[in-house]
């Protein structure tokens, strides 16, 4: 391989080297589309005869732009998996790559930086801080990436505007309905523009109408190119997913894609248009 590359650098054309380079580039492009890769992941509690496993020899790949719903009975490892993906917990054994970086044994400080920049969280019980206003709750993730206060509050205000909550900015969580609290939680999850959103039973404490509103918001976020991984017990919500994984005893029982990888949404790239300069004839 090395001699082929050297032969091509002398100026002559080497079809074999070109083909090998193209294959290598294709592999890089394919790997760049895999945002999460887990191999042989195990989460063990206790030792010896008392050991129990939340995950055991678990393998998973998630591509950029997927909306993955994870289902299964209580105790099957869904929340443990979500916590490990979100760098809130560590596996006992195995490998975990996030955007190509091995994060299995990184420091706690590095974990915190990655969480702040790349991952947004939505929880069943909202996890809003009661003595902070709505806008302060939403702005909180930006504290961990050292954004100035005025920048944080402006970004939080824009996020709340998206969910029609501008008039609630200076309310406290206790003054909101359940549906409003979850929309605030979603605004908080997206305020730092993360690549991945993790949702743990986001509709579990909501009525059917509020659940529908929250899922429509998540669908809209997904259609903009975000990768969403959501744990749920509600099979009716799988219509929103591009892939449904059923877990049992710490392993994947079934893994069904509802759309092909070619149909996954891509992040929207907005290019500023340069103003066209008027000709002298137009100016006259």
Image: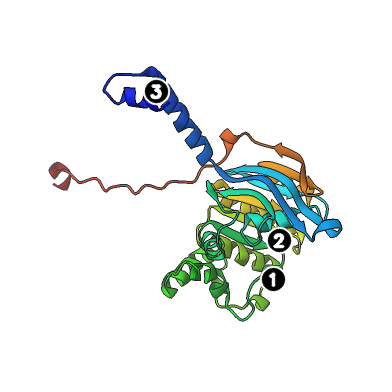
Which residue shows up at 38% across the image and 24% down it? 3
Regarding mark 3 in the picture, which secondary structure is present there?
helix
Whichever of callouts 2 and 3 sits on the residue coming sooner in the sequence is 3
- Return the mark for residue 210: 2
Which residue shows up at 68% across the image and 52% down it? 93
Circles 2 and 1: CB atoms closer than 8 Å: yes
On the image, which quarter does residue 183 sit in? Answer: bottom right
Question: In whole angstroms, how far apart are the C-alphas of marks 2 and 1?
Answer: 10 Å
Classify residue 119 as left or right of residue 211: left
Nearer the observer, 220 or 124: 124
Considering the image in quadrants, where does the N terminus appear?
top left
Q: Is residue 162 above or below residue 256?
A: below
Classify residue 5 as left or right of residue 253: left
Q: How many marks?
A: 3
Which residue shows up at 72% across the image and 51% down it? 42
- Return the mark for residue 177: 1
Whichever of callouts 2 and 1 sits on the residue coming sooner in the sequence is 1
> What residue occupies the far right of the structure in this picture?
49
> What residue occupies the far bottom of the structure in this picture?
131
Looking at the rendered image, the disc whose residue lies closer to the viewer, 1 or 3, is: 3
Which residue shows up at 73% across the image and 55% down it? 43
Residue 134, x across and y down, in percent: 58, 74
Residue 256, x across and y down, in percent: 72, 37
Residue 202, x across and y down, in percent: 70, 59
């Amino acid at each position: 391989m090395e001699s082929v590359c050297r032969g091509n650098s002398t100026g002559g054309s080497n079809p074999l080297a070109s083909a090998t380079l193209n294959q290598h580039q294709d592999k890089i492009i394919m790997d760049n589309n895999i945002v999460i890769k887990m191999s042989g992941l195990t989460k063990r509690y206790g030792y010896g005869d008392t050991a129990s496993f939340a995950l055991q020899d678990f393998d998973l790949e998630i591509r950029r732009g997927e909306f993955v719903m994870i289902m299964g009975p209580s105790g099957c490892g869904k929340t443990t998996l979500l916590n490990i993906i979100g760098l809130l917990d560590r596996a006992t054994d195995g490998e975990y790559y996030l955007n190509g970086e091995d994060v299995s044994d990184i420091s706690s400080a590095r974990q915190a930086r990655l969480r702040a920049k790349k991952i947004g969280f939505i929880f069943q019980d909202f996890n809003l801080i009661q003595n902070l206003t709505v806008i302060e709750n939403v702005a909180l993730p930006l504290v961990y990436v050292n954004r100035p206060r005025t920048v944080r509050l402006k970004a939080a205000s824009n996020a709340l505007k998206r969910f029609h909550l501008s008039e609630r900015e200076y309310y406290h969580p206790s003054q909101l309905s359940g549906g409003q609290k979850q929309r605030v939680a979603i605004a908080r999850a997206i305020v730092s523009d993360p690549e991945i959103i993790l949702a743990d039973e986001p509709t579990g404490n909501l009525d059917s109408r509020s659940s529908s509103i929250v899922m429509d918001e998540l669908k809209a976020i997904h259609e903009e190119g975000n990768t969403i991984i959501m744990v749920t017990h509600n099979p009716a919500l799988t219509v929103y997913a591009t892939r449904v994984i059923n877990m049992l005893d710490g392993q994947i029982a079934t893994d069904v894609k509802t759309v092909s990888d070619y149909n996954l949404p891509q992040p929207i790239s907005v290019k500023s248009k340069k103003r066209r300069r008027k000709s002298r004839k137009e100016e006259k």
